[in-house]
Amino acid sequence: MKQNPLDYIIPESEVVRNITRCVNCRICEKQCPNEVHKFNEKLNCMTADESLCVNCQRCVATCPAHALKIQKNECAFRENHNWKSDNIKEIYKQARTGGVLLSSMGNPNKFPVYFDRILINASQVTNPSVDPLREPMETRVFLGKKPGEIRRDPDGNIIPELPVHLELSMPVMFSAMSYGSISYNAHKSLAAAAKELGIFYNTGEGGLHEDFYCYADNTVVQVASGRFGVHEKYLDSAAAIEIKMGQGAKPGIGGHLPGTKIIGDVSATRMIPEGSDAISPAPHHDIYSIEDLRQLVYSLKEATQYKKPIIVKVAAVHNIAAIAAGIARSGADIIAIDGFRGGTGAAPTRIRDNVGIPIELALAAVDTRLREEGTRNNVSLIVGGSIRSAADVVKAIALGADACYIATAALIALGCHLCRTCGSGKCSWGIATADLVKRLDPEEGARRLVNLMRAWKHEIKEMMGGMGINSIEALCGNRLMLRGVNLTEKELEILGIYHAGE
Amino acid sequence: MIINSQGLDPREINELIRTAKEKSIVLNNCLGQRFIGSGLGKKEISINGIPGNALGAYLNGASITVNGNAQDAVGDTMDSGEIVIHGSAGDAAGYSMRGGEIYIKNNAGYRAGVHMKEYKQKKPVIVIGGRAGSFLGEYQAGGIIIVLGLNSDGRPIVSNFPCTGMHGGKMILRGELPSIHFPHQTTSHTADENDFAQFAPFIKKYCNYFGADYEKLINDKYTVITPDSKNPYKQMYVSN
Amino acid sequence: MKAGELMKLEGEIRIPSGCAVSAMISKEGRRVSGQKIIESMIPMHERSNGLGGGFAGYGIYPDFKDFYAFHIFFNDKYIIEECEKILKDRFEIVKSENIPIRKIPEITDVPYIKRYFLAPLASVLARLQIDEKEYVVRTVMDINTKIKGAYVFSSGKNMGTFKAVGYPEDVGRFYRLDEYEAYSWTAHGRYPTNTPGWWGGAHPFGLLDYTVVHNGEISSYDANRRYIEMFGYKCTLQTDTEVITYIADYLLRRKGLTLNETASVIAAPFWTTIQQKPQREAARLEFLRKAFPSLLITGPFSIILGFSGGLMALNDRLKLRSMVTAQKGDTVYIASEEAAIRRMEPEISDIYAPAGGEPVIVKVEEGKY
């Protein structure tokens, strides 16, 4: 078949093979799920079709001779700062197919990363820093409502009854990723790590595999608009229930797991027939207004006898402060806000790259608004949408978050190389795939997640200690510990911080 | 020589001490003046009243007797010499002490012996007769801290978080003390003959200074705490 | 340069401070002159730097004990008129006068310093349907945030705060505290890093009959401030002492916590310590820590909280500041240094150093104040 030259898209990457090193062992060929590498019998050497390459770096990492490099392809359109290469390629793709562009993982574009423009304080002279290795340093957090009135028994003793809440050993938890969008072994890694760390992982909206019911104490189950796999046992097998209203990568958009991925256990877990598309509607069709949210919150509380906190997860959108203020009066115990950089298995490119706002600004606006409203005690705040390091966690907490959600960082710990082709189902690292799941050993995965979180915890303690703070609650909302660099007056005003030097 | 310290500031007092021809000096009516005997060489000072913070800091061979309590940071970075307190000491007694001996008849506040260290023949010693506050021997890197627990107020011999970050030296507490929680990077054992040989002379000295019953004390059991490693945090880091 | 012309005033910037504190209280309610408490600050001279000193005395206005005694600084006399208008709208002014001072060279740039004995207007109270104390608090907040150049620095009954820029021993003489008698005194010498610019920044800080003197710079300040401001308090001075006072008022008056419970919130024990407590006590401590996480104060502090009929002294949970207490006869003494206590009472036999987070609560016998 003759190829139409218009359909040829210049590959982003180039496969560079050092022939003097290559021993023709063909491991790259076996490792590449995209069939980039082939052995040419005639020439007795390896060849590559880089048009198939997604730059997942699997071949590079597995080549025993270190003979491979994946580089940015020098072959490019004529430079044009307005018509960038991506703009042109996207038009070709759409002109060929008439399709809506889909992308995976978070918004990769050059928007300001506010975390990188915020600096953290440290004590000098006027008060002492605290040594986290020697002195007690507390990172334990509790998520949920604070008690209202203090009640006492007839002898005047406080009745120590607290509203239902989650307890975390550190202010980080694994964010929602559904079974189906990520593999069984990836889920198992997250669940086991959460248990060992004393934190939580989140099932996402794809139901909960029976094998993981044993992790109930460290599980947050999600109730999304598609209500896949939501039944009594599901709700019971969780420490908290999250109502997913939106996701940072695709605010206002529902989900669509293609029928090709609804096979075997995924089908059983979602409780839909094999091969049938799993479509999550854009809105919850029982929530068209804020008072309807209250209804869903309380219906879930009733169903679980008021024993589990309810999280409401929303995407960070323009009016987030008012939305969060409404949620804080809905009976929800925790609000999770997902910034526009949050990852996804697949989202329409235009939505992912153009809808929503940065989590730093959303968080600051929400925390400020809830305090103005006097409702900050009604809810805890979790934020996600590209928390990349312990420093981001510390900054988020100081801006006013109680805890952070991480997902992309957790996937990277499991081996993700951010090639951003999760939607293909051919994840070479065994994460976003059903086929190559064995490539991810759940025990090793859990160990890597535990290592990552332990390292972050140490780093969080180091930073807290530097500030002279020995308990995370004294960091929460402590914005004086932050200063901005390279930010406008308006940005500083929204973040509620001073500029460095002030 | 007798100095009446009433109305004198620390600088005036130290000047008088340094320039005195006599080796032995009595300081009367002391009330809160800081830095007394700072960096002082071979002299003997006896203090009546309450010396202020940082008594005998950088002490360089002098011996100081306080006939009463001392405030915070007694013997801060002390190098050699002796401080004897016929009362209690405030917080951070013997901070970063490098050598010499401190004897406290009664209690010590928080962080006694914080970051005491030793080098070759220089081994600092602190003996506390009563009880010690929290963070006793924090970061201890050398030397010996002895607590006898002779206090009669019913409070424990040592408060919370003893030996955090200990990575050298020895701590000796009278009694078997199974309920005290020591950090995981340390090991505790009941004192054996070798331990006794090492610390008994200091208890003897304590008894001589303050009139305690040596025979009775030396027949008690003692708990000895030592660090497992000189560098307990090595495995925490990865180069970047 | 006169402070305040080019530099920012306290309240416009945050100024960290170190300090000296001391206090004395008669459990029998015996009233003694301010002479001793002034002298107690002399041995701790090194802990201040001449940029702030102050005192609070309880039981000093027995003839007006049923009225709120407002002490107010005014930058100029026009502001006095403006402020008095507000006071007249809301209170019956039972008495107004200049606070007597002694002119001494050590204290300069003296503002107008007046005091008012006030009774809330019943008609306004009835219309607003709020409790009397809340009404007084709102008035203080209104004057301090809305009238530039007027600052209410004392607002309790039968007590008063006296403060200025200067060394505490000079401030005591300036206000002629030797001529007042109180059953309880607290004192403060300040070591601010910057020039505070005006007198309102000195300590004690007071609201109603709560006063706080404090030593140390807390690291939880903004977490505490942003929390407490949810409940109508406005931290205009940006000082630790101010926010601690509001926390005390909120927990004690508005949430009805006891002094011990309040101490367990602001100097909450570590979780590991809580776990070792007997079950009931552990449950109580866990409840308080989880109920008021944002009111945990971290970083070094030693505070003395004064209130009608008592005092509470408290150190931070790591005990990063020093504080000692002693008792002789019916009088309890508290100070940053033992020397200060011995200056007040040389014949003390037993000095006690409270542990970090261990409150020392002293109350005057019921009916004796």
Image (cartoon, coloured by chain):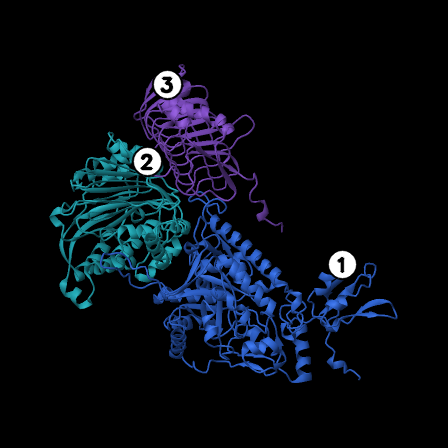
Chain colours: A blue, B purple, C cyan
Q: What is the chain identity of the residue bearing mark 3?
A: B
Judge by depth and name the residue closer to the eye, A257 or A203.
A203
Q: Which residue is mark 2?
A: C337
Q: Amino acid at mark 3?
A: Ile
Q: Amino acid at mark 2?
A: Glu
Tell me the SS state at disc 2: loop
Tell me the SS state at disc 1: loop
Q: Which label is found at residue B25?
A: 3
| Residues at marks 1 and 3 touching, judged by CB atoms closer than 8 Å | no
Q: Which residue is mark 1?
A: A66
Question: Picture coordinates of residue A32 (x, y %)?
Answer: 73, 69
In the drawing, does residue A303 fall left or right of residue A66?
Answer: left
Establish if A443 lies above or below B181: below
In the drawing, does residue C31 fall left or right of residue B114?
Answer: left
Q: Amino acid at mark 1?
A: His
Residue in the image at 41% along x and 54% along y:
A474
Give the alpha-carbon distance from disc 3 to disc 2, as whole Å. 25 Å
Determine which quarter of the picture holds residue A419: bottom right
| Residues at marks 3 and 2 touching, judged by CB atoms closer than 8 Å | no
Residue in the image at 44% along x and 73% along y:
A319
Question: Picture coordinates of residue B47 (x, y %)?
Answer: 34, 23
Establish if B190 lies above or below A214: above
Give the alpha-carbon distance from disc 1 to disc 3, as whole Å. 78 Å
Residue in the image at 73% along x and 64% along y:
A59
Tell me the SS state at disc 3: strand
**In this rendering, does residue C101 appear at all?**
yes
